[in-house]
């Protein structure tokens, strides 16, 4: 059964949720479904490129309000615009991603009998957008057809939704290496061994913890350099922290790279010190590039992807000593790195794009069939 599928997300800016929906859209279109992607923002914010097989509606309705009254008025207008846009695609099923957009889609479609699936990318127990949005989430999520969590850890936090209205489908992992080489900052030394890290520069991703852990061992490993890929509001703060820790020249912030895979494939090791995750694509893409991964064992995500001592190492969350020790153990042991790397690419067999998209297709078809009957 071929379906008309409408996907909704705030933007195609740089991030794991955005990357996941682009891959889902592409995969569904390759299966000959009619796929439309709606973004609340316009194309000027795009970081990821959408498959030409996917139709695109950009609404350009993102923006900040100066006061509460203006916020209420603007949000009512946005919901009307969103409702009209979704109806124009005449969908068999609607899929939304990221919490604020999920709430908006559910509210916009009240009274319309489309099957609506919302995707929760983060652990609601530890990642919050504030009281208003969390209240709205609790009120709206039970109204949709299905809440899909990207890991079992995330699903455990959706306790207000009955289990038969929930599902776990992991984010798809694939490598889209177009063979282009990014222009890296001049401080990057191609002759050094690279440790790579990749993610938004936010408190959630724990780059501050990574800097402190690396500082504990950097002097012992002068031939190693840490490259942190990503952009975000904490960049200036983190760069100052790097300098204060005496790591100038040892740690380089590259910014977000459209093709990070050239860096990942050249690196010897991948490390993340996230405080919390959903199901982190950055970790998966590093594994897919054949890198051993060291990650903090967040409440959800990494432990469902990384097999400890098989393709990577999991360390206690926010434990700087354990993180530094794990890094030093692999930096000092090339044979151990090769042993873990040999199993790393199996992540594609477990969470590859085709496998994950097929799970999505099965779920959507079931909901559409239930609506018809």
Image (cartoon, grey):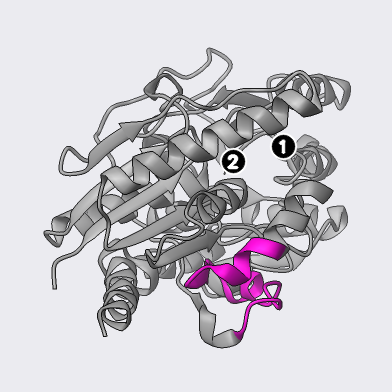
Q: Answer with left or right where residue 200 lies relative to residue 58.
A: right
Image quadrant of residue 308? bottom right
Magenta stretch contains residue 279: no
Task: Give the SS element for disc 2.
Answer: loop
Q: Position of residue 42 (x, y in %)?
A: 41, 24
**Alpha-carbon neighbours of circle 2 within 10 Å: few (<14), some, or many (≥20)?**
many
Does residue 295 sit above or below 168 in this rendering?
above
Q: Position of residue 206 (x, y in %)?
A: 75, 44
The magenta stretch spans which residues?
139-162
In front here: 35 or 173? 35
Q: Is residue 152 magenta?
A: yes
At 45% from the left and 40% from the top, the residue drawn is 82
Whether pointer 2 and pointer 1 mark residues with C-beta atoms closer than 8 Å, the reply is yes
Whether residue 264 is visible to the viewer of this picture, yes or no, is: no
Horizontal arrangement in the rendering, residue 325 relative to residue 5 (left or right): right
> In the drawing, does residue 185 fall left or right of residue 318?
left
Q: Quadrant of residue 43?
A: top left
How far apart are the alpha carbons under marks 2 and 1? 8 Å
In the picture of the structure, the residue carrying the numbered disc 2 is 199
- How many badges with numbers are in the image? 2
Instruction: List the single residue furthest toward the front.
Output: 111
Q: Quadrant of the N terminus?
A: bottom left
The quadrant the C terminus occupies is bottom left
Label for residue 292? Answer: none
Residue at 57% x, 66% y is 312
Q: Disc 1 designates what residue? A: 202
- Frontmost residue, 271 versus 342: 271
């Amino acid at each position: 059964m071929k379906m008309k599928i409408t996907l909704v997300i705030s933007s195609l800016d740089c991030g794991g949720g955005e990357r996941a929906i682009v891959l889902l859209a592409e995969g569904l279109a390759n299966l000959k479904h009619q796929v439309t992607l709606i973004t609340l923002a316009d194309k000027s914010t795009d970081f990821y490129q959408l498959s030409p097989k996917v139709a695109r509606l950009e609404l350009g309705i993102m923006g900040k309000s100066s006061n509460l009254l203006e916020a209420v008025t603007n949000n009512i207008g946005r919901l009307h615009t969103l409702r009209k846009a979704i109806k124009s695609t005449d969908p068999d099923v609607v899929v939304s991603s990221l919490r604020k957009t999920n709430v908006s889609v559910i509210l916009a479609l009240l009274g319309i009998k489309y099957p609506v699936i919302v995707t929760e990318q983060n652990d609601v127990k530890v990642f919050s957008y504030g009281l208003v949005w969390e209240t709205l989430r609790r009120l709206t999520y039970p109204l949709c057809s299905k809440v899909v969590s990207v890991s079992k850890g995330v699903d455990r936090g959706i306790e207000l939704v009955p289990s038969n209205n929930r599902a776990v489908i992991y984010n798809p992992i694939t490598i889209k290496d177009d063979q282009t080489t990014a222009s890296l900052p001049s401080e990057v030394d191609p002759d050094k061994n690279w440790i790579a890290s990749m993610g938004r520069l936010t408190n959630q991703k724990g780059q501050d913890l990574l800097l402190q852990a690396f500082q504990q061992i950097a002097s012992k490993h002068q031939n190693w350099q840490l490259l942190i890929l990503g952009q975000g509001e904490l960049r200036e703060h983190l760069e100052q922290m790097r300098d204060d820790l005496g790591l100038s020249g040892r740690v380089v912030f590259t910014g977000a790279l459209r093709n990070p895979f050239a860096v990942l494939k050249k690196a010897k090791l991948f490390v993340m010190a996230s405080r919390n995750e959903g199901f982190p694509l950055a970790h998966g893409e590093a594994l897919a590039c054949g890198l051993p991964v060291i990650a903090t064992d967040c409440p959800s995500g990494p432990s469902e992807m990384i097999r400890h001592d098989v393709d990577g190492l999991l360390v206690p969350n926010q434990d700087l000593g354990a993180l530094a020790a794990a890094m030093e153990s692999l930096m000092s042991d090339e044979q151990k790195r090769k042993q873990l790397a040999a199993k790393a690419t199996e992540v594609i067999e477990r969470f590859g794009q085709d496998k994950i998209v097929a799970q999505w297709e099965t779920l959507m078809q079931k909901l559409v069939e239930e609506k018809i009957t």
